[in-house]
Image (tube, rainbow, N blue to C red):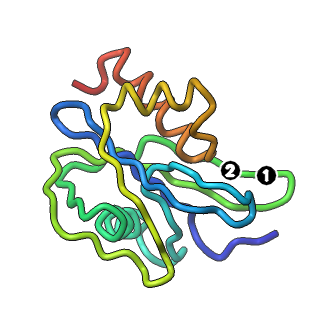
Amino acid sequence: MHFKGWAIGVLALDEQFNTWLVGQYRFPLNQYSWEIPEGGGPLDIDPLLSAQRELLEETGLVAQDWTRIMEMHLSNSVSDEHAIIYLARDLRQETACPEETEQLQVRKLPFEEAYQLVEQGKITDSVSVAAILKVKLMLADGRIS
């Protein structure tokens, strides 16, 4: 399967090491899912602009500091979907503006709690799992302070 856009993920992290998760019902899985803010972005637009849009739409957050932390292929045996994941810092709260079709719940929680949800198998979205584990490693080795 050929995708005509990027998969974009954003892990927002504030000064107190809180992060934000977005909850929504995922019809293909027939279950509710907690995820980092994520969505799609056109290939002809800088993926950072798509990440900034997704973070604002889903959480109302605006970040001043952006770091591309990883790229991954989401299911390379059946598709060419390419994900780009960012860490967003230096956050300011604005007003969320989700798409009309999105019925989202937004939850702010300590990053360590999000990590524990991954460890417990309660967060299963691949982009979210990868981002949370990557940031956990970055915190452990001092790349984030």
Viewer-closest of 118 and 3: 118
| Residue 43 position by quadrant | bottom right
Which residue has dot 2 on it?
73
Name the residue at the right extreme.
Answer: 77
- Crowdedness of circle 1 by 10 Å Cα count: few (<14), some, many (20+)? few
Q: Amino acid at mark 2?
A: His
User: Relative to 50, is 1 on the left or the right?
Assistant: right
Depth check, front residue: 28 or 76: 28
Q: Position of residue 64 (x, y in %)?
A: 17, 54
Q: Is 84 on the left or on the right of 80, as rendered? A: left
Q: Name the foreground residue: 75 vs 13.
A: 13
- Quarter of the image with the C terminus is top left
- Which circle marks residue 64 in the picture? none
Neighbour tally class for label 2: few under 14, some 14-19, many 20 plus, Cα within 10 Å = some
Residue 76: which numbered mark, if any?
1
User: Which residue is located at x 35 percent, y 44 percent?
Assistant: 87
Where residue 117 appears, as percent x and y from the top left, is 51, 31
How far apart, in angstroms, are the residues tagged by discs 2 and 1? 6 Å
Question: Is 45 above or below relative to 64?
Answer: below
Q: Is residue 122 above or below residue 44?
A: above
Find numbered disc 2 in the image and state the secondary structure of the residue it sits on: strand
Q: Is residue 5 above or below residue 48?
A: below
Residue 37 placement, left or right of 81:
left
Q: Tell me which amino acid carries mark 1.
A: Asn
Q: Looking at the image, which residue is at 31% across and 38% down?
A: 109
